[in-house]
Image (spheres, rainbow, N blue to C red):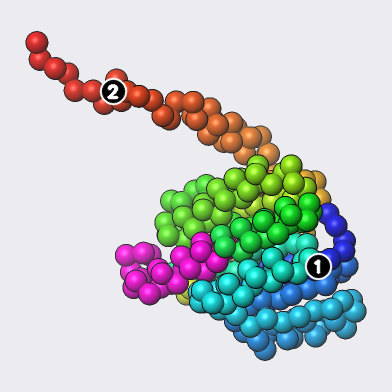
Amino acid sequence: MSTTGTALITGASSGIGAVYAHRLAHRGYDLILVARDTAKLEAVAERLRAETGRAIEVVSADLAIAANVEQIAHRLDAEPAITLLVNNAGITLSGSVLESGPEQVQRLIAVNITAPALLAAAAGKAFAARKAGTIVNIASVLALVPEMLDGVYSGSKAFLLNLSIDLAAKLRESGVHVQAVLPGATRTAIWKISGKDVDAILPGKVMDAGDLVDAALAGLDKGETITIPPLADESLWTAYHEARLALAPHLSESQVAARYRRAVAA
């Protein structure tokens, strides 16, 4: 991974995003930190400027607002110094989709799906034109196991996984690397905001955000497209991935499968 250029990180005021800011600044990146909470962003930026001497810009933006997303997408296109995008910003529902109002669902889709898709597309086009760059999309293991939590949130993370796989294939020959990171339960503020006690849900299985990001960066350094930091047995992912690919030749036919045909009486 390049140790020069500028990294743009969304959701950078706390949690995983703030740890990425710390790690990337110490790797030699200048930073553009994006989030809604300006005060928290400034605190992260001030600390990292003092530690690393890197140039760090703070951008206050709500990614549920289309105009804010457009402004950030324009910067990805217009500023050649930006070589790395970390699509980290995300929200969850306080209850299930059946317990949430339409505004909550719409906001989740805007932040978790629309914004990262538009930013990844803008970065992909710009990086491909420059023949270099990296896109990191923070998805979730829930993309693989939607039964574990609400389907709207897990579905948004499945979207990011699918997007990453597609972009990785399309951009590889252009010198652009795309990585999807699939965290398990990670100790961040998102749980408190959503009113969930993660330690009660998954006792003894909650990862520290620092460990998560360090593993994600190790996967990036190895050139991985899919990085699952809590997964010890890589063969489980390989088997899942190969089984999924094995379905592909059988998923589109001119005739319905025999098991769906009704018997016709003579």
User: In the depicted view, which residue is nearer to us: 208 or 28?
Assistant: 28
Left or right position of 51 against 249:
right
Q: Main secondary structure of the magenta part?
A: helix
Q: Quadrant of the C terminus?
A: top left
Q: Earlier in the sequence, mark 2 or mark 1?
A: 1
Q: Which residues are magenta?
A: 94-116
Residue located at (51% from left, 77% from top): 65
Residue at position x 70%, y 59% from top? 126
* Residue 11 locus on image (x, y percent): 63, 72
Q: Is residue 196 visible?
A: no
Q: Residue furthest left?
A: 266
Q: Quadrant of residue 133?
A: bottom right
Q: Which residue is mark 1?
A: 81
In the rendered view, tell whether residue 110 sits above or below residue 39: above
Assign the N terminus to one quadrant of the image: bottom right
Choose between 65 and 27: the one closer to the eye.
65
From this view, report whether residue 238 is shown above or below residue 228.
above
Q: What residue is pinned by disc 2?
A: 259
Instruction: Name the quadrant containing residue 204.
Output: bottom right
Magenta-drawn stretch contains 235: no
The amino acid type found where label 2 is placed reads Arg
Residue 182 place in picture, x, y as percent:
62, 53
Q: Are marks 2 and 1 in contact (CB under 8 Å)?
A: no
Q: Residues within 10 Å of mark 1 (few under 14, many from 20)?
A: few
